[in-house]
Amino acid sequence: MSMDKKAFFKISYGMYVVSSGGADKYNGQIANTAFQVTAEPPQFAVCINKQNLTHEFIQKSGVFTVSILEQDTPVKFIGHFGFKSGRELDKFADIEYKIGITGAPVVTQNCLAYLECKIKGSADAGTHTVFIGEIVDAQTVKEGEPMTYAYYHQVKNGKSPSTAPTFIKDEKIELKEEKKMPKYKCTVCNYVYDPEKGDSDSGIEPGTSFEDLPDDWVCPVCGVGKDEFEKID
Ligand code: FE
């Protein structure tokens, strides 16, 4: 029997910004693989792609911070940290953050709580490195529901049912439309524009066809223009 990779999707994850750096050079990236590994002492692990600038900064500084994102985090914010490279832009230019006790930046925007870690070890995982750090500080920023990876995919990309109020609204629109408008997929990041949902983060009302999107509309996740999208059935 061949391996069923769909089984992987049954694992739950959160959504985090992992940041590192020091001496005025900061970077951060979205990670869903971040988890506590021991209680005494409290240690935390993150899994980071070796090609990412954050990986380089963690190796150099020996510290990293983890910001736990709230459920209402806009996809644009996730795109900013997830689909842009810190080698091309300063990701911290227009973002709320502070410098933690480790000297590494801590993203405080859309953040419920954060941890600061000092590297104690690492494991080579081929394309990635698993960094294990001792938690040296942890603070709550505000109360709220943390975003899960599943929520990001189901609600923010509009695929599956959810208890979210926006979903109920979309269901009604779907019944009203006689002909369904086609969805379009971003060829860069795979974000799907669903006309029935619109793009609330950019002020696009549900029921707006892809053709009717303004010419200057950009992918809310990675920021490319309409010409990078293709129609999907
Ligand atoms: Fe995109």
Image (tube, rainbow, N blue to C red):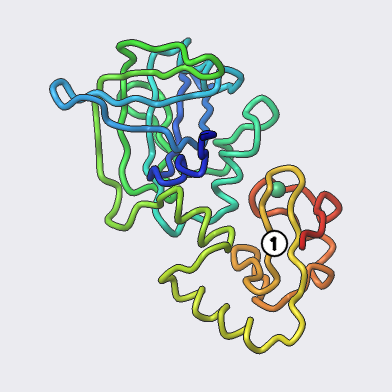
- The residue lying at 51 percent from left, 62 percent from top is 155
Left or right? Give the position of 82 relative to 16: right
Where residue 54 appears, as percent x and y from the top left, is 52, 23
Which secondary structure, mark 1? strand
Look at the picture and state if 18 lies above or below 214. above
- The residue lying at 49 percent from left, 79 percent from top is 168
Q: Which residue is mark 1?
A: 193
Q: Nearer the viewer, residue 227 or 65?
A: 227
Left or right? Give the position of 63 relative to 152: left
Where residue 28 appears, as percent x and y from the top left, is 51, 31
Q: Nearer the viewer, residue 11 or 80?
A: 11
Which quadrant of the view contains residue 91? top right
Which quadrant of the view contains residue 183? bottom right
Tell me the kind of residue under disc 1: Tyr
Which quadrant of the view contains residue 34? top left
- The residue lying at 45 percent from left, 42 percent from top is 7
Look at the picture and state if 232 lies above or below 141. below
Where residue 196 appears, as percent x and y from the top left, is 66, 74
